[in-house]
Image (cartoon, helix red, strand yellow):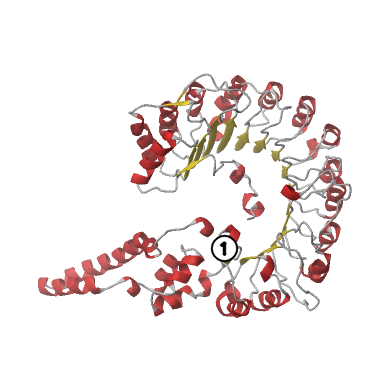
Amino acid sequence: MDVRRFTMTNSTAMFSNVAQEAWGHKIDSEFEDELDHDDEHNASQRSKRRIKRDFNTLPEKILLAIFSYLPHIELLRCARVCRLWHALSQNSRLWKTVFLRPEYHGLHVKNLDLFLQLIGHRFSASLQFIELPMELITADVLHELANKCPNLKYLTLDFSTAMQLHDFYDLNIFPCNLKMLCICLSEVIFLEGFMRRIYTYLSSVEILQIIGTIEKSNEAEEEVYETINISKIKAQTPNLRVINFYGIFFIDDNHIEIIASGCIHLECLALNFCTRVKGASFKTLLQRCRKLQCLLLQNTGIEDHGMLAADWGSSVVNELDISSTELSENCLVNIFERMPNLAYLAVPNCDGFTDKVLALLIDLDKLTNIRAIDLSNTVNLNHEVVFTLLKRHGRQLRGLSYAGNSKVTEQFWINTIKHLKNVKILVMGTPHGWFKKINTRIHIDQVLEACAHECQRLERLEIQWDEETLRWNENSSKFIDHIRIRCVRLQSLVLADGEYYELVRSNFERADRQRVVRTTTSDQTSIVGLLNYYNDLRFN
């Protein structure tokens, strides 16, 4: 469970279900034993004493287990209730993972000196994961983490808001047992002075994430400044398995060549939104990184000649994302003929992915192991070929995204959903005004009923058809009831804002499922959670 997303308005309410079950089990077992040995009068007296017992009489182990479900902001509030709760909330076992970036639902630290004391007193040897905003990335804080938190494995350093760095001349120690290091770059600050102090402590790092400022970059700039030295980092991290370069505008094929020369253990490389990567380095990458299984290239500048030159036939790449790239149909046919079987494929907004390409994948049995596929907004892909794919391989799919085709109506999904027995993530529909306007009305009740009957493992569902396209009536509530009751694992149902959204939301809220129904304006569903390396690639 992601503690950052788990919130409630009343901190004590969060204990009710877990505490009642735990306490009820304890009392019931005791009470039954007593009835077997005592007379009716003694049983009555003990029943009265049972009522006087309260939550705090539970064993400390159970209390800590209940407290562990609380986000840290709620722990701090609970600390004000009584002495026992104050002591429990300070238990270091509840502070294994600490988020300190307020813009990402973390705690806000106002007093640096007090925070330095907490590192040793409250975090200590239990701390495994911590995120530090710019104001907390100081030599003193890093010294304390290195000295007092020997089990720290995951560290995020967020320089994204920095206009100038702290003085790191006296930084002479740094956490040396890290498994993951995430660095969020600043647009204007060069980090070499800081990095020079920590290079020698990075040999244990297996997961490296460097997050850029893609939304602030300007590709028209004549000069490109490298705010961090990739080659020096690579030289000090020989054990890298996962590399995530996200939105770094200076990353190009020369940097990929450098990585390929020394990362023989590399299993996952994500270059999403690194627009200067053209693919010329992929031949070397696949030759040297024989363990590479996952390659994510969303919104990169990859070109046909670079992809064609790579030796895909001898690679073990089975997870591929080429979303929003400009590869041609001939290029895709060539590389898919040579690639091994795919477990994950994302090709939204890829005009080169046509009927011919998908038919080739089906005919060559390249999708026999497919676990998740995203075919959204592929304008040159006919829904008849997609139906052939889903009819053959639908039962093994855990995630499917097929949105943006104006010709796909509810009849396609009614015929298709019966083949998606095991799907967990499903995205369908076409938003208003995308490419072509939909001329038919979608009978949403039939779609929900099909999902309720066939997709009972469904966890996330997004329906992108807008309010004007959907059709429903006064009996729609019973179909909403069906999907709510039968799809008990459903965590997210995303709909276009409007009257139908309000109807569905009120239905779920009456059943005390307040956070399930959401709007397409604020939430978006993706199949990326089904990547094998998803947990290693997460940031923010």
Residue at left offset 83%, top offset 42%: 282
Q: Is residue 267 visible?
A: no
- 10 Å crowding of disc 1: few (<14), some (14-19), many (20+): some
Q: Is residue 462 visible?
A: yes
Q: Judging from the image, what secondary structure is the residue with disc 1 in?
A: loop
* Snapshot quadrant of residue 341: top right
* Residue under label 1: 106
Position of residue 25 relative to residue 38, above or below, is: above
Q: What residue type is labelled 1?
A: Gly
* Snapshot quadrant of residue 234: bottom right
Position of residue 86 relative to residue 394, above or below, is: below
Q: Where is residue 136 in the image (x, y as percent from the top left)?
A: 67, 70
Q: Position of residue 296 (x, y in %)?
A: 72, 43
Residue at left offset 68%, top offset 75%: 141
Is 395 left, or right, of 163 in this rendering? left
Camera-nearest residue between 513 and 150: 513
Camera-nearest residue between 451 and 512: 512
Residue at left offset 35%, top offset 59%: 17
Q: Where is residue 335 in the image (x, y as percent from the top left)?
A: 78, 31
- Quadrant into which the C terminus falls: bottom right
Is 281 left, or right, of 388 in this rendering? right
Position of residue 454 relative to residue 9, above or below, is: above
* Snapshot quadrant of residue 301: top right
Q: What number of labels is visible? A: 1
Camera-nearest residue between 194 and 268: 194
